[in-house]
Image (spheres, helix red, strand yellow):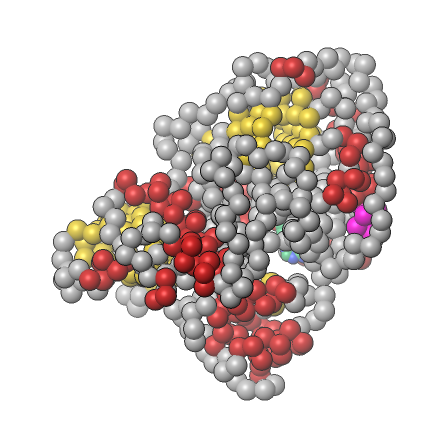
Amino acid sequence: MPLEEPARLAQELASHGYTADREAITLLAGADNPAEALLLAVEATPEDALKLTAADVHDALETRSPAAPGDDSDHGRRDPISSDENRETDDDHAPAAKAAKRAASGAKTSVESSTDEGSAPSTEPSTGDDPSVSTGTTMSKPAIDRGDVPVETKGSASGRSADPALRSLEIGNNMTGRSTGTGEYGDFVTTFRDRYKRLAGKLRGRINHRNATALEASPGGGDAGMVGMVSDIRSTTSGHWLIELEDTTGVFPCLVMKDKAIAGLVDELLYDEVIAVDGTLSDDGSIMFVDDLYFPDVPRTYEPSTADRHVQAALISDIHVGSQEFMADAWNRFTDWLHTEDAANIEYLLIAGDMVEGVGVYPDQDEELDIIDIFDQYERFSEYLKQVPGDIEIVMIPGNHDAVRLAEPQPGFDEELRDIMTAHDARIVSNPAVVTIEGVSILMYHGVSLDEVIAELPEEKANYDEPHKAMYQLLKKRHVAPQFGSHTRLAPEEKDYLVMDEVPDVFHTGHVHKLGWGKYRNVLAVNSGCWQAQTDFQKSVNIDPDAGFAPVLDLDTLDMTVHKFS
Ligand code: D5M
Ligand code: FE
Ligand code: ZN
């Protein structure tokens, strides 16, 4: 089986509108004829299913020929960042250019300048290159021109007297209109190499890195260190951990003995994250015994920036307008309150995705829709947004229920949707994006990967009741969605926009519909709850959402207060 097969399969599935779990792809990749197996599986999977499971693949293949057993050493998640064709002896020796060459139709070359960070115009229109809808709905309804509808500012006489001249708001890492991915194989390789390169840069200083090829060639014995992307984690029969680390030259096996203090870190590892290890080589040089393991992490001494004046931002997400469970009463109370003296210092409103309920996001979702047309949902959302005082600056990113592509990074809403939401002149940016408000950098990310972190890590390190703890893990990994191929879909781009280049002062996510906040090495992590009451699905799996809360952040102290409107 060629190693790139799983990635091709994942891509092919995406083109059929499916995502698939790890096992499903492994099963497909292990089939005698993966392409045929994929078609069989797609045919056999119910139309309304969005995700192909291993059971689906089993069912589909069983009727033809028994599926080959999954190959433990290949999870079918992503392309290797190393391969014989790409083998480099120097990690930084233009691996991306080589990978791009391999793409059948030739990946585009870079269009990004090195000044990208922090300089992307926040309201830059999308080019239309971005596949804009992932919901299966047709974008047939014409946009309605509401360009001159005034923003409602009801009650704003009551004490809102903010001085816009004191404000500053910059957007960074906004990939809206910059999507370069062609969906070709080489693009995935490019993205992963960029991830490796940027995160490895943060780890190199901590160990004496030798690349996989150099380690393989070394005679054995002595100290060794390596920075690599986690490509496999297995437990050995005697309870130790074998971690395969990959760099741009190859893969090298690293053994963490169960009695080492660092063995407790192994259960925090996710596939595709970049770590560094330090230890000794076995006498025959075939394996490294790990003594220390490092994450890119936030420096312990990190000092966040604060605003120079007392000004506040409300951090919300997951409004889900269009769902029968959208809590209009709570929203109305919130927006009424924004007009009061109590909220006079709130000059910014950040919305971290899921503005509307969307269409076809989950099976049977249509049974709980209040508004069935996606454009009508945005029209209604826009009406609710108009209740927010007109002088409040709004920033919004999309989520998995919004009408943009599902794969991350997600570009900001396209022109058609912007036209619907013009009234407030909100900054419409990508997921993720970095918003710097009066010096305070806030990383906004919708949060789909939190489901993954919570599913993969032990309960005490990540759980739905303490979503901020799962966020700490992402901060530690300096990546908003490390593991590819299960919950999280990745769109290959020239650069990995999901890497946290800079440590943010505040990390704001949503998605899991739970309210939680806390500080990790002085970085405030906030998961902002939702405005949607419990859905039937959530009831069936015992998710009790925190709905109708508005966390409010003091930008001068980074203290939080939570206001309840439900
Ligand atoms: O998802 C809100 C939370 O609920 C998030 O943790 C995923 C989970 N969820 C909700 N509905 C489903 C279905 N149908 N399948 C799996 N997981 C689900 P959000 O996407 O923000 O609505
Ligand atoms: Fe949501
Ligand atoms: Zn969501």
Instruction: State the image quarter where residue 540 is shown.
Output: bottom right
Q: Nearer the viewer, residue 131 or 10?
A: 131
At which x and y percent is residue 397?
64, 40
Q: Residue 38, relative to residue 152: is it above or below?
A: below
Q: Nearer the viewer, residue 85 or 411?
A: 85
Residue 342 in the figure: left or right of residue 94: right
Residue at 44% x, 42% y is 478
Residue 555 inside the magenta-drawn segment = no
Residue at 58% x, 32% y is 171
Image quadrant for the N terminus? Answer: bottom left
Question: Over which residues does the magenta segment extend?
Answer: 373-377
Q: Nearer the viewer, residue 423 or 349?
A: 423
Residue 9 in the figure: left or right of residue 539: left
Mostly what secondary structure, the magenta segment?
A: helix
At which x and y percent is residue 559?
54, 23
Q: Residue 222, relative to residue 298: is it above or below?
A: below
**Can residue 33 be seen in this snapshot?**
yes
